[in-house]
Image (tube, rainbow, N blue to C red):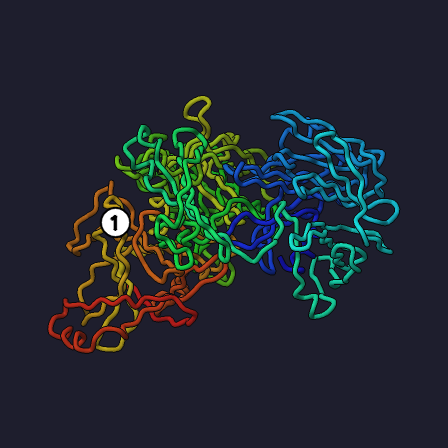
Amino acid sequence: MSVQDLARTLVAAGSIRSPDADEEGIYLLNVSDSNLVEKLWVGDGAKSELVIASDAKANTTAAYLLDAAQDIRLVVFIDQSHTVQCYAYNDEIEEWEKTGLGEKWNITAHPQSKLSATFGPKGDIVVCYQDTAGRLAGVMSVAEGEWKKLGPLKADPVTGTPICLDVIDDKLHLFYASKDSSVRYLVLNSATNDWQVNLLPNTKFETPIDNFSVAKNPDTGFFQSYFLTAGSLWNVNGDKEKTRLGKVERNGKLIPADNAQAGWRVYWRGARYVEATPYRVRICVLELLEPSRAGGSNACRGAPQVLLIVLPQVSLTFLHIYETDWTSRRQTHQYLHKMSFDSLGIDLKDFNLPSQYFNQTQRGDGPPKTDRYGIDLKTPPRRWEDWIVKLEFEKLGQGKHGNGFFVNIPINTFDVIFTAGHNLVDAPQHYCGNIRIITPTGEIPVTPEMTRVHKRYFDEPDEMNAIYDYGIILLRRPGGHRDPRRGFGFSLMLGLSPPLRGDAAPKGEEEKDMVQDRNLYVSGYRPVVQDSPGKGPPRRSDGKCVLAGTHQLIYKAKTEEGISGGPVWLGFRGVETVVAIHNYGKATIGKGNRGSRLNLDFWRTVFGWLDIYYSDKSLHHKATAPYSMHLHIPSDVTPASRKAPAEGRVRVGQPGRIESRFDVLPVSSQPGDRVRDACWSFLLSEARSSTGAGSASTSSSPLRWVRWDVYKQRVQLTDRYDARCEVMIINLILQPNKPFEIQARLDQDTWLQVQMTMALVDPGDLELLADDPQSVEDTSEISFGVSANKLFTFQ
């Protein structure tokens, strides 16, 4: 850990290292406008932000408790009423929720109290604070649901002292600043429950201590302490003299005292972890028999796993073998035996486990980590209100109210409003009368020419066609693309149901829909005078998605008549992202309200109306005459075959036969994105087979998306959509008749140019292409780089 990272942790209200082995990150806790905020800090910036609680005390410290093995992730802090509270992270909804521990503890702390918490030597949770009299006190878990009080402890702390709890040498240590300006610590004797007072040498400072951290140096056996006082960071190594490491600004930035201190070695207790050696530990688990393919649950027991631990520069002589019981809800492991490496003839110095046996997280095969839920703090909190419109119209002679909302569609000439079809149609092939958009300054009349409604609903507008009950309103932009009306973001990823795995699918491996059980918002203006633009904002309710169907979402969010046409949305990738159009109440009592899901069929229909859906296209790259180059991906390997998908190739010909054609459509756009910033995806055209014979695929055929794998420098087909299927096609909409560039995602913020060449094709083979216009040569020269050449076209 660097000194800079240490400085950030001491300025923060609390911190802990990220458990992700692939990411050298730190979770920092800070209080901003009474919000307790969690930030994942990687390198020099925050990678993500999430609000934990909205009633934190301004000067509270917070303790982050993380136990990945036990699936525990807690934050303890003091709220504005000086009560000690505890929040837990809910993996299902990816949000922090209040636990009942605050009420169970019933702790009122001193107004200036800080706190600390840790896991004790036996895995128990310990929390320490200053009580209303300023004395050190605490609570400790002793059994499930049972807690015992600690103290008041015999100590003389300064009011508002920083508190540091840690387990050192299997004993609980409590560090604090005492009234004699030194730092002292109490050590718990678990046998007698007595606390022994000790002095931390050489820790007196002329200025108050704002925060500190103490760890034990495993090399020397001395305490290694770091203090933040009067804006300076100090180190005390055992009983030696103090060393000033530098100045720390309010944002946590460290200005080193000199070059030597810039490279100072830090021992840090964070998450009860002390960095003692430079060794990295490689842990590999070999599943010798996958339980899901072992012939059912009866074969699951006895599926052995080999746990191999390799430590560089450390002697290792045994292979440990465990048996995994997969029949229980939580996998349990029984130790079987150990085996000598000498007996296996394995030389660990030269041993490398083949990468195909690595876990996905070790191989780096996972998609870029962009698919997070929630809204970032930097997102203006109520901007969505400006994207919702109120509609008034006449339906069968009666005045009615409805809603619509803007969506940030990558189109150059119109702003697009989504709404329910029954806000536009009142009878078969008959539009509602006098449709108007209500604005703060007046009304905008809507004519039939400005609308599009799904043909199925337009012909038969009744609840039997509820999934087709949607339409759009097009408002021409006076200033073209220079004056767009932004709206909700969208992501096709949230509209795709998990692919069916067939009868051969392993039991228990069914994927969960990305929207299922998520908390969804439904927004809109109520049909009352005070709920109108300029008079009152649109309302918002929320509730869990209880059923994520292919074409319809059912959710518990409260609605009422007149809300139809409003957005059903959630936070995704940090912004407001729409997932459905609300159009009906409960079909069955207790089941929830309904909305048309923004799935692939929906987007194909809408983008077809807007003429930004490219169907049955081949992707060509500029080549030296007389040759042509285009993307070819063999598609005869199906997901059901369980064979590795073939990699894409550059196909060279004069012009050569074309066997790979794609449907290309926009798949995501955020509220602030420009037209050029939208993401697109390539889907193998359903009208083509691997032979190019033009045979139509059946409705049960899986979708075949193009995956652009930047890390592995390859392109493949997949039925499992993720962020690697998204690319940016720069200026395709703004300059539709000109060549364009394609950029694929390396990580959340980095995009690289897709490149094709034919430099490795043998010149003799190229000469033969002139003899037959259908003959081809395929080469693997697809790569990703930093050049930005507009060389691609659709044909």
| Relative image position of residue 728 (x, y in whole percent) | 41, 60
Count the numbered circles shown.
Answer: 1
State the residue lying farthest toward the right.
180
- Would residue 3 be found to the left or right of residue 195 on screen? left
Quarter location, residue 789: bottom left
Q: Residue at x 59, y 43 (%)?
A: 533
Q: Residue at x 38, y 50 (%)?
A: 342
Any part of residue 285 in sight: yes
- Would residue 756 be found to the left or right of residue 338 on screen? left
Please tell me which residue lies in front, 500 or 421. 500
Q: Which residue is mark 1?
A: 643
Q: Point out the image quarter for the N terminus.
A: bottom right
Type of amino acid at the residue the image marks with label 1: Lys
Determine crowd level at label 1: few under 14, some 14-19, many 20+ residues with C-alpha closer than 10 A.
Answer: few
Residue 761 position (above or below residue 572):
below
Any part of residue 584 in sight: no
| Relative image position of residue 781 (x, y in whole percent) | 30, 68
| Relative image position of residue 329 (x, y in whole percent) | 44, 29
Q: Residue at x 80, y 34 (%)?
A: 153
State the residue lying farthest toward the top.
589
Please tell me which residue lies in front, 716 or 73. 73
| Relative image position of residue 271 (x, y in whole percent) | 62, 45
State the residue lying farthest toward the left.
771
Residue 733 position (above or below residue 517):
below
Q: Point out the image quarter for the C terminus.
A: bottom left
Quarter location, residue 414: bottom left
SS state under label 1: loop
Please tell me which residue lies in front, 646 or 685. 646
